[in-house]
Image (cartoon, rainbow, N blue to C red):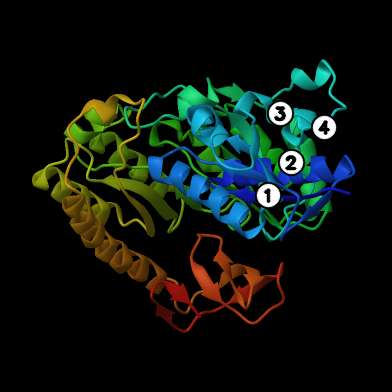
Amino acid sequence: MKRVSFVTFGCKVSQYESQALREAVAARGYEVVDGEADLYVINTCTVTETAAKEAERTVRRLKRRNPAAEFAVTGCAADSHREKFLGLPGVRRVVTHDEKSALPLLLDDPRLTADDLKPSIFDLRVSRFDGHTRAFLKVQDGCDLNCSFCIIPQVRGPNVARPLDECVEEAGRLAANGYREIVITGVHTGSFHEMPALVERMLALPGLARVRLSSIEVNEIADPLLDLMAANPGRFCPHFHLPLQSGDDGVLRAMRRRYNSTQFRRAIDRIRAKIQDPGLTTDVIVGFPTEDDAAFERTVAFCREAGFSRIHIFPYSRRSGTDAALMPDLPDGVKKERLHALEAVAAELMQAFALRFVGRDVDVLVEDEGRGYTERYLQARVEAPPNTLARLRPSRAENGVLS
């Protein structure tokens, strides 16, 4: 029996798709393993050039370790870096995003039919999440935003929504298999127009304790969603991941983001008017080509004003094929300096938010080694078995971690 191992790069969508592929491959009679394998499926990311290069290095490293191994490359970088991957030792096939659910193609299986070559991006489904306490539910694919720094619309294609009933069915399967929290995810999650109906039906599923949104754009936050969250405190997690990217309006225009800082600020005000102490996390790109010192300082000031509980900070990485790649790049030293400066602010803000919950009851979904996350996505230490929803009244917060 051929042993197949998966290596995954990138976002929650990539993790979801790798899990779906694992299950489909196992159902086809292959042995799915975590270690040495006959075939490695490399599920790639292409958000940055660095991510694609890391996948290339991984193929080379695994080939040196296991000279007899073969490789199948899929994921977003399979579209953007096809020829590079085909030139790597051991890579027998590169399967594009649209082809990845055609398992015989991925596995080089002779049992290939015409129907196998007509896959749907939603043919891949999950019933569990190996190695995870929380499960991910993919509700859409593709993106129509076309931000100037992003290649994803070119490799994932236009926005496509998954049928609502299919989403609910999969959520029910995950809940029945013991998952206490499901994170709703997608390439552009907030574009899923039936989100309130989906959340409402998920909250009615037996055994499911919490529903969480992975990410949403500020101009997609609708009152029905806020009202549903306000009516279900703790169960519909009061946590919004709102990608900011920059707090400077000029940089936002150059990025082709579809909001300005004033609109973002108003969205936060709307959330806080309805939700008590919401967790607000974000993404910020530092060192974008048009970001000067003043623009960066405006971003720092905006982050402080917004009071984000966690900031994922990325130094700008030129991505060939995007409009931003044609702009003059900033020196790496400038990017690194701004990264460290914003990291210090992010740590300060995370600690300040965590301190609000000292002496207050929080619910922690325990993941492993006595650690887990609260409903507001604060990390916490609590002595309880994994996959337990434990009540904690923290007495301290250190580096943003409750205990």
Q: Residues within 10 Å of mark 4 (few under 14, many from 20)?
A: few
**Label 3 element class:** loop
Identify residue for label 4: 109
Label 1 and label 4: CA atoms lie apart by 17 Å
Nearest to N terminus: mark 2 or mark 3 = 2
- Tell me, yes or no, whether the two marked residues, 2 and 3, touch with CB atoms within 8 Å: no
The relative height of residue 252 versus residue 6 in the rendered view (above or below) is above
Q: Position of residue 382 (x, y in %)?
A: 60, 79
User: Which residue does the numbered mark 3 point to in the structure image?
Assistant: 122
Whole-angstrom CA distance, mark 2 to mark 3, is 12 Å
Residue 225 vs residue 366, the one in the foreground? 366
Which residue is nearer to you in this view: 250 or 389?
Answer: 250
The residue at the point 28 percent across, 62 percent down is 343
Q: In terms of sequence position, does the residue under pointer 1 or pointer 2 come before the other?
A: 1
Q: Which residue is mark 1?
A: 6
Left or right of residue 173: residue 230? left
Q: Inspect the image, locate mark 4, and give the three-letter code of the amino acid beneath it.
A: Asp
Does any portion of residue 187 appear in the rendered image? no
Q: Position of residue 233 (x, y in %)?
A: 58, 55
Mark 2 lies on residue = 21
- Residue sitting at 74 percent across and 41 percent down? 21
